[in-house]
Image (cartoon, helix red, strand yellow):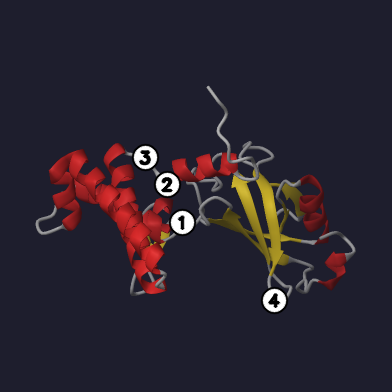
Amino acid sequence: MNQATGDSFKFDEQGLLPAVVQDWLDGTVLMLGYMNQEALTKTVATRKVHFWSRSRNKLWEKGETSGHTLSVRELFVDCDRDTILVKAQPIGPTCHTGERACFFSRLDESGGTVGSGSEDAQGGILEGVLRTIIERRSHPQAGSYTTKLFEGGQDKILKKVAEEAGEVLLASKGGKKEEIVYEVADLFFHTLMVLGYHGVSLQDIYEELGRRFGKSGLRPEK
């Protein structure tokens, strides 16, 4: 993507493209901004996200005053070539309010806004399941399988991880996709139980995987 190819983008009547910024580690949508040709070219060249400010009518680098910059990992354009997707690594919170992401007000059934927290809109299903697990540990619920596992302690949780890992092996040997999917889902859930037990976040895991991304899989000898 360069200035020459920018000619083929469908900028609006103000010469702008909406740019959706996504955390490259867990897929959280961090913010929406607008880029003109100059901002797009600058973003590609510096690998730092730049926008065109519609209110100030000027080019600006995200985080130029706060230090909360966005480092570009990958750039995509949609099928209509009128929207940019930026996969970025955020340095600090992205929202000017101090929240990690700008999307932290939930819409209720009437269309009104309900204050919550940006963690509710973060990531995907794994984050949601882990939040529920942590909630069950803090607030046990009668009849809850998760609560029952916590009541059994760490050994019970770890025993289930070992059992489910074995089931994954058997399903893989069997070669049936639906069984593999079912057993891996079970293994994922019980592994999330381990994280919830120790207070480890998925972000911690994503960051560790991010540090390994593109590197040799061999661990250095100690």
Q: Position of residue 105 (x, y in %)?
A: 42, 59
Q: Which residue is mark 2?
A: 202
Identified at 42% across, 47% down, the residue is 202
Q: Which mark is residue 200?
A: 3
Residue situated furthest top in the rendering: 222
| Quarter of the view holding residue 128 | bottom left
Secondary structure at badge 1 equals loop
Identified at 13% across, 54% down, the residue is 141
In front: label 1 or label 3: 3
Secondary structure at badge 2 equals helix
Please name whichever residue, 209 or 219, is drawn nearer the observer in this view of the structure.
219
Task: Tell me which amino acid carries mark 4.
Answer: Cys
Task: Tell me which amino acid carries mark 3.
Answer: Val
In front: label 2 or label 4: 2
The reply to whether residue 152 is in sight is: yes
Q: Are marks 1 and 2 in contact (CB under 8 Å)?
A: yes
Q: Which mark is residue 123?
A: 1
Q: CA distance from mark 1 to mark 3?
A: 15 Å
Q: Position of residue 214 (x, y in %)?
A: 65, 45
Q: Which residue is mark 4?
A: 79
Q: Are marks 4 and 1 in contact (CB under 8 Å)?
A: no
